[in-house]
Image (cartoon, rainbow, N blue to C red):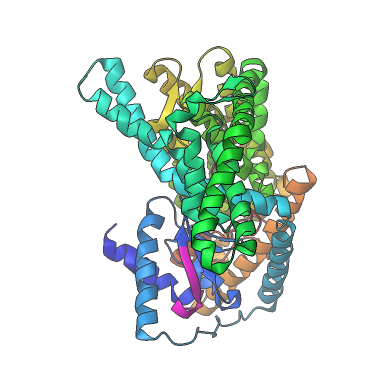
Amino acid sequence: MSEDTYRATAAALLPLVGGAANVASVAHCMTRLRLGLRDRSLVRDDALRALPSILGVVEDDTYQIVLGPGTVARVTPALEELVEQARTAGDPAPDRTGPAPASAPDAEQLAARGAALKARQKARNATPVKQFLRRIANIFVPLIPALIGCGIVAGFNGLLTNLGSLPSLVPALTAIASGFLSLIAVFVGINTAKEFGGTPVLGGAVAAVTVFPGVAHLTVFGQRLSPGQGGVLGALAAALLAVQVERGCRKVVPEALDVLVTPALTVLLTGLVTLFGLMYAAGEVSTAIGSCATWLLAHGGAVAGFLLGGLFLPLVMLGLHQALIPIHATLIQQQGYTVLLPILAMAGAGQVGAAFALYLRLPRNRSLRRTIKSALPAGLLGVGEPLIYGVSLPLGRPFITACLGGAFGGGFLGLLNQLGDTVGSTAIGPSGWALFPLVKGDRGLSSTLLVYALGLVVGYAAGFLATYFFGLGRQQRAELNADPGAAEGTEETEGTEVAATAGATTAGVAQAAGTAQAAGMPQAPDSAQAPDVGAAGAAARAGGEPSPAPAGTPGTPVTASGSASSTP
């Protein structure tokens, strides 16, 4: 798409979030535009979800709009520019005129129920543990683009090495691929201090101690330290301690001496504790993580892979998946790749297979089939939110059968790992087909790529078969396959019924989430709240069709509310 297209997207969504005056902050991660809003009530959710470029909406500590990888990195600066221009020109007060109320009373009642359920879900996810994990994730998410870039360069460098081509270029590519990883501790320290309210450069300074070559001359607890010992966990702990030391100094050091004494004491005290305690302790923990992951797949094999692949999305729903990010980073730093990510990526494959099954099982539900068609390309590339929250989760049982597909795909990779065909990823973030450039193993590249591809096929097939035969009950299938021919009504009727569909789906999602939670499978995209998927709204708009299912029936083209991110 052209730059004008991205700017048009930004211009279209800005008034729908209350205008520039309502935007307190703008940021983005791999797939989402994250907005800090002054007044959440000014957001026109239905109109926002109806924009063709919007894949979904997540309500968390920030208002998150799912745009997909690549697109979000281009729309964000365009939106920042528009916000700045509006503020410079003197933006009027936020627009407090909301969308016209739906003419159908049932739609209003269902929308109110959905809003209440969403508020309760958000409150359930606002626990201290989940908020802490979310902050930990905020430290590592900004590092993902560099991990991906260096990972792809490392993969290309490995290919050249195996082929014996361009030997003079290999050392240069090695330096490019390894430079960031050798100093990742510094970036972790900077982001940690920033996230927890300290001075970023002081966090980076104490984290840099862990990678300084001179630490090799120190002996702690009878062991000689090594540069980088403790990895990202040591840097994280050092920066957290630095934040606390800095805050303590600010309270007792006179203002006249603060600029000299506080930084010095922060670096000195934290540095000493890091060298003579944290590096050793974090090193032991990092080694245990690597050993545990290796042991788990070497001995657990298919069983371990089955559990990891099948339970990943429920972990996302609970917001606990964020605890895996430091583990991935530790494994990448230790071993050069994380063996867990490809297995967890199978969860997305199960969703794709389930969506194909629903597409074939519901030939007369044209609006849902359009939703599936629009969401499948993103799903194949590892962006699973539109399929999860737009298709499988609102229907209830298909979400569980899709998780089974992911379990079988993960079990396949776990079994192959146990047999000696290890498959890992040199970076975190991508999934699905997008993970191919980052795949690495202990055998040849072609063998590793083949094993990963076969894992995806197993996930697709298992998700398809489980959903095709067990995903829908007879009555539910009959309701969802009802003849939508009556949809050719007047324009006013169509608009009312589409609104009713959105409201009904919100209630349907709550029912499905309750079913999943009762089964021990609670959700949540990157973080603890589920996006309201806009693909269905766009599809219904384009086709001028209302939902064929009666109001309140799960499985209509959807807007969802719950908790999560599908990034492994």
**Quarter the C terminus occupies:** top right
Answer above or below: position of 20 versus 224.
below
Q: Is residue 111 magenta?
A: no
Q: Nearer the viewer, residue 23 or 375?
A: 23
As drawn, which residue projects farthest toward the top? 419
Quarter-of-image position of residue 2: bottom left
Residue drawn at (49%, 29%) of the image: 215
Image quadrant where one finds the N terminus: bottom left
Left or right: residue 462 versus residue 370 is right
* Number of numbered discs: 0
Between 217 and 492, the residue placed more toward the observer is: 217
Is residue 235 placed above or below 27 in the rendered structure? above
Residue 415 located left or right of residue 189: right
Q: Which residues are magenta?
A: 17-26
Q: Residue furthest right?
A: 518
Q: Residue at coordinates 63% horizontally, 41% vertically from top-left?
A: 323
Q: Is residue 21 magenta?
A: yes
Q: Residue at x 58, y 44 (%)?
A: 270
Q: Position of residue 370 (x, y in %)?
A: 48, 54
Quarter location, residue 427: top left
**x%, y% of residue 181?**
42, 34
* Residue 125 visible in the shown view: yes
Q: Position of residue 549 (x, y in %)?
A: 64, 60
- Observer able to see residue 408: no
- Which residue is pictured at 46% across the width and 61% down the height? 27
